[in-house]
Amino acid sequence: MPASATTAVEKALDLAEAVARAARPPRLSEIADALGMNRATAYRVLADLVKRGWVLRLDDRYLPGPVLLQLADVSRRRSLTGLARPVLAELSDRTGMMANVQVLAPGGSRVLDVVRPDALRMISDLRGELLPPHRFAGPLALVAALPEGEREPYLRAAGEDGADPDGLRQRIERAVRDGHAVQRGRAEELVGSAARVVTSAAGTPVCALALVGPAREFTGPRLRELLAELERCAARLGTRLTELTQPQEYRD
C-alpha cells in the first residue's frame, strides 16, 4: 500500500483496485498482504465496498462488483481511450502505420492506447510507457502546445536524460510553427514518428495522435500524406470530444 494511502477513501480505492486488477478472485488475506494493510481494516472496508456494490463477495473471495463493471463499461464508451479507439483504427488502416494516443505526464507523455498493424510487430508499441520529448514526436508536439512557461519542467527532465536543451527548444519552436512534430531515428535508429495535438474547444491540449513506423516513411511526399491523415483524424477526435462535453440540447 502506498505510504500516502492513509485516509478511508485511499484505502477503499486501493482495495477496489486490487480486486479489479487481480488475475483471479483474491482472498482477504491475499489483498491485505499485497497492500500491506491490516486484515481487520481491509475486512471492514471491503464490507462497505460490498454494500455499495463496488465489490462482490463470493465465499472467501472477492470479485469486481456491479458498480465497478458499470464504470468499466462507461469508460470503454466515454473515456478518451474509448473515443480515440475507432480513430486510431482508421488512422492505422489508412496509413499502414502504428497509431497511438498519448497524454502529457511528468517528464513527457504517456501512451494510452495503440493500434499496430501486423507488418510492424517488430516495433514495440510502448503502451503505458513514458516517452520523453527529445526522442518521440508525441511528447514533443504536446510540449510545444503548452504555454512557453509551462515547458520548462519538460526541458529540465530532458536535459537530465542527456538531451541538448537548446536543440530541443529549436525542435519545439519548429513544432509550434508547423502544427505537428516529426522525429526520425531518435528513439530507435530505423524508427520514425509524427504527431499532432488534439485540443479542447478552449484550445487546451488534451492529447496527441501519433504515427510510428519505419524512419524512411517520414520524409518527402510520403510524410505529407501521413501528416494529412494525422490532421484529419485529430480534427475528428477533437469533434468527438467537443460533442461529448456539450449540453444535450446542443447535440440533438
Image: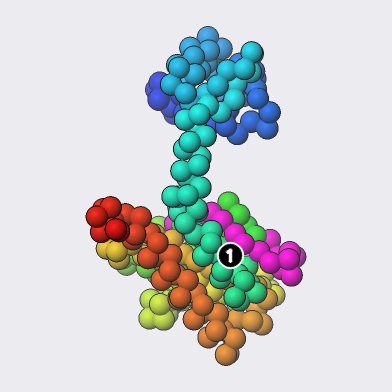
Can residue 135 be seen from the camera position used here?
no
Q: Position of residue 22 (x, y in %)?
A: 64, 31
Provide the secondary structure element on which disc 1 rests: helix
Q: Nearer the viewer, residue 218 or 140?
A: 218
Q: Position of residue 83 (x, y in %)?
A: 47, 56
Which residue is at a point 66% across and 64% down the rendered structure image? 116
Question: Would residue 117 be counted in the magenta stretch?
Answer: yes
Q: Quadrant of the C terminus?
A: bottom left
Query: Picture quarter containing residue 48?
Result: top left
> Which stretch did the figure color magenta?
104-124
Left or right, 117 with respect to 71, comes to right
Left or right, 93 with respect to 235, comes to right
Q: Nearer the viewer, residue 211 or 54?
A: 54
Residue where numbered disc 1 is placed = 89
Query: Picture quarter containing residue 125?
Result: bottom right
Which residue is at a point 74% across and 70% down the rendered structure image? 119
Q: Nearer the viewer, residue 93 or 145?
A: 93
Q: Amino acid at mark 1?
A: Ala
Q: Position of residue 13 (x, y in %)?
A: 47, 28
- Residue found at the very far bottom of the displayed protein: 221
Above or below, 129 relative to 48: below
